[in-house]
Each structure stands twice: as structure tokens, then as C-alpha cells.
Amino acid sequence: MVKKRYILNFPPESGDKPLSYHLVRDYDIRINILKAEVYPGKRGSLLLELQGKKENIEKGVKYLTDQHVVCEPLEKRIHFEEKKCIDCGNCTAVCFAGALTMNRETWKLEFDKSKCVVCELCIPACPLHLFEIDFK
Amino acid sequence: MSKIKTYEEINQKLKQGKAVVLTAEEVSQLAKHASPAEIVEKVDVVTTATFGAMCSSGALINFGHPSPPIRMEKIRLNGVPCYEGLAAVDGYIGATACDPDTPAYGGAHVIQDLLEGKEVVLEAWGKGTDCYPRKHIYTSIHINTINEFTLFNPRNAYQNYNVAVNTTKRMIHTYMGTLLPNMRNATYSTSGELSPLLNDPELRTIGIGTRIFLCGAQGFVVWNGTQFNTSRPKNKFGVPVTNAATIAVMGNLKEMSPEYLQAVYYEKYGVSMFVGIGIPIPVLDEDLARRVSIANSQIETSVLDYGTEGMPKLDQVTYEQLQSGYIRVKGNKIRTAPVSSLAKARKIAQELKVQLQNGQFEISKPIQLFPKNTSLKPLKETEAENG
């Protein structure tokens, strides 16, 4: 069993298909919707956590891609200019998901992207504006 | 009779490379099994440091006279207002200054850009006088083309600072970062046992003329900082439990490093500047040995509600608790986050330690100590005449 988060971007025409239902039924994937923005007739974006057998998740992702849904691992959509980080800790104050934490020994910032729920609070909270998340 | 050392003795040892220098964190560890008497025997200098946002900062610049000359009566640097009420080509760019149309780029960014060797656009206007006939100039300046480029910060390195929480139902944006509603987070700012003014709470060695590490260069404490307050309540270990003393500092920006100076922009607050300060404290006697040995568990600070007018105090916590990741405020367990960089403060303390050990940094006795028994006045509004 593996667990992995993906950002899904739906084109306007696939907005009304029960895609997550097929993921569950056809590929035995446990899904957890962490964030959703749907604009009927325009587009939709989902942050989905997929849990299941590795090969089933791969098949499920292929199924989504065949339905013209852009499906990318969450980490690829998070951009963090780590080199410029001064380890001030401001982003950790707002990250209730626990993705951004201070190492209590070195007091350097640690970023576990797999825990991100795309709340996007870190984007304005960083006084150097080092975060970008491509959700839409 | 307990040992007493002089600045001269310590400087002699520093020059010979024989002095023992520890960081304030290292001496706090040492103090767990060494008495103040032993520490004054063993240790000569303790390095302290901080790297945090300090709004009351800025740079004095002399642009040099153009030909024909101009009396600069309005100055913009990359569009940011620069204070011009000085002599013809002198200006002071405050860290928090900005054009309201572009609030995310301010004086701190101008200072950082110059420090990093970038060209900055200078535009200035004058009314034109007999001796300064010119009315307008539009050109670019560079760190190497300007004359003096001096960091002058009227208030830095606060001795302790509050913890910020927000009891209201709405998220608020402050210089202490983003405060989530219903006390879902707490932010704190000083480097605790490494913080300069917490290691010499009576300011016996930090005064006018103290040589310090300032953004990578050697700078000086030039005065007490603004809002200097010695009347704050102290705990049983002799440290104030809220923001108290401050220092004004100066140094040559041309010798500084962008590694220790960083412009920042806080959403819905404004621009500020992270300033790196390191202060060496000579261990002259047992009293100072005891002071520099202070540990996070002995330093307390006040938890204030930034969401409520008047910022009422809710509780008092130690830096040991703050650095553990959680504090308890009125029975609630709250996640904590720093808003100043302890990692960078440690780097400064370490770098200063190396400079001292290599005989590159001479410690200096204050020419004059700061005033005692100062307190703060609020701004009382009166009905101004002809107002």
C-alpha cells in the first residue's frame, strides 16, 4: 500500500464525470479529497490523496489522464526557493498541516511536501515570498 | 576574593590568541556543572547574537554632488521616498519607507539592492537656488559611486520581546507574523539565551561605544535605542519579562554582507529589515559570569493578545517552553513558532567567536553607560491650537 497526493486539473468538459467513483470502484483506491475548487463549465481543481496498491494507483492515474484530466504529484506543483530561506519560522506559524516545521536541534526549516494540504497560508506568511503553489 | 578581569587583560589575551571564547549557548551548558567563580576563571568572552526584523533601521547616504549641482529637496530611490531634510546631497532611507502603490518594495529592499551591488535609480528635485541651480536629476547610483553609506538604526536588539497570540475569531496580520484565530498559534521573536541584551541585563558592558558585529562588519552601539525602558518588571533571575532596553547602532554598510541583512515584507503590514547583530560580552567578574550563564528555562516573557485593543497580557512563559514547540496559555495548548532566525543568530555568534579568537575583533569598554530608571510616555492627544 502506498499513499500519495496529486493535484488534478479538470478541463471544462470533464467536470461532470464521476471520476473519483471510478477510482474507488475500478482500481480499489482509497481517496481523500483535501481541497476542491470547481467552477462548472470552466474548470475544476482537486487535491486528492490516493491510497492503494502501487500498480493500481498508476492505472488510476492513467485512467484520469485518458479522461483529459491533468494529474500531477503534489510535490511537482509546490515551488520553494530554499536557497534564499533565512529560517525565520514565519511559515511554520501558519502551517497547521505540519508540512513546514523547525528542526528543534538546528533550527533550520524542514519542508515535508507530502503533508501539504494546499491551504496556501505560507505564501503570504513568508516575508521573503519564497513559496509558490500551482493548484489551478 | 573573587577574580576580576579588565578589558585590557582580555584584549591582550585575544591578541595573543589565548583567550577562551564561548557562545552564550555554550556557556549556558557549561554553567550546568560550573559555578560563576569557575566560569570567570575559565571564560574570557561570551558571544551573543540575534537575527530578526528590526523596523527602526535605515541608511544614511551621501550621493555626491552632480554638475551642475542640485539641492535635493525631494528624493526617490527606485521610487521609494528617501528623507531629504538634510544637506543638499545627504539622504536617509528608512527601512520601512515605501511608495503606497508598491507596498512590497521598500527602503529595506533599496538598502539590500545597493549592498548586493545592484544599480538603484535616484530621482531628485530641487527648487533651484543661486548656489544649487538645478531642479531635477534622474540617474542611477551604485554602492561604489556613493560616498558614505552608513547603517544607522535608532532601535535594534530589543531586550526580550512579547509572545503574540490572537484570541479573536479572525486571522490577523502583524509584524509578529500571521496570527490564526482562537489562539491556534503563538509567535515569539528573540533568540532567548543567545540574545544580546538578555545576557547583560543591567547593561554593564553594553553602552555607548561598544564594538559589535553588525551585519558582517564591525559597528558600534552609538546610543541607547528609542523606547529604552529600564522600568519593566524583572523575574527572579534578573531579566525583564517583556520588551525593555534597546540599542541604537551604526556601521559602514560598504563593509557589510547581504548574508546578515535581509529586506522583508509582511503581508498587510509592510516592509521591515532583518538585521544581524552580535555582541561580545567580557566575563569581567562573577556577576557577569552568572548573567551570561542564563538559560532558556530562566528567561520568561509575556504572552499578549494582539487581537484585542491594548494587547492585554494573558500569561507568562519561558523560552524553554517556547522552543519546545508548545506553550500553555490559560489552559490551552498552543503551537509556537519563532519569527526570528535562531539558525542565523547561531551562525553570527559562531563567526564573532572565531573573529575574537583570531584577534580580529577587539572588545571595547563603553565610553558611557546608558541611563538608569527610564520609562515610556504614551502620546497624549491634546487639542492643538489652530488645529
Image (spheres, coloured by chain):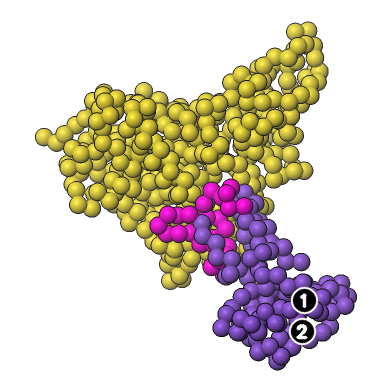
Chain colours: A purple, B yellow
Q: Residue furthest bottom?
A: A25
Q: Residue furthest left?
A: B1
Q: Which residue is at a point 60% across and 84% down the rendered structure image?
A: A53
Q: Amino acid at mark 2?
A: Leu
Mark 2 Cα within 10 Å, few/some/many (few <14, many 20+)?
A: some
**Mark 2 = which residue?**
A19
Q: Is residue B62 magenta?
A: no
Q: Chain of mark 2?
A: A
Residue A112: quadrant of the picture: bottom right
Labels in figure, total: 2
Task: Name the spot of residue A85 as percent of width and height, x first.
Answer: 56, 50
Which residue is nearer to you in this view: B156 or A41? A41
Q: Chain of mark 1?
A: A
Q: Which residue is at a point 51% across and 60% down the rendered structure image?
A: A110
Residue A118: quadrant of the picture: bottom right
Q: Which residue is at a point 59% across and 66% down the rendered structure image?
A: A113
**Mark 1 = which residue?**
A65
Placement of B374 over or under B309, stated as above or below: above
Placement of B60 over or under B88, stated as above or below: below
The span picked out in magenta is A81-108
Left/right of residue B34 with respect to residue A69 in the rendered view: left
Where, quadrant-wise, is the C terminus of chain B in this rendering?
Answer: top right
Q: Are marks 2 and 1 on the same chain?
A: yes
Label annotation for residue B350: none
Left/right of residue A97 with respect to residue B136 in the rendered view: left
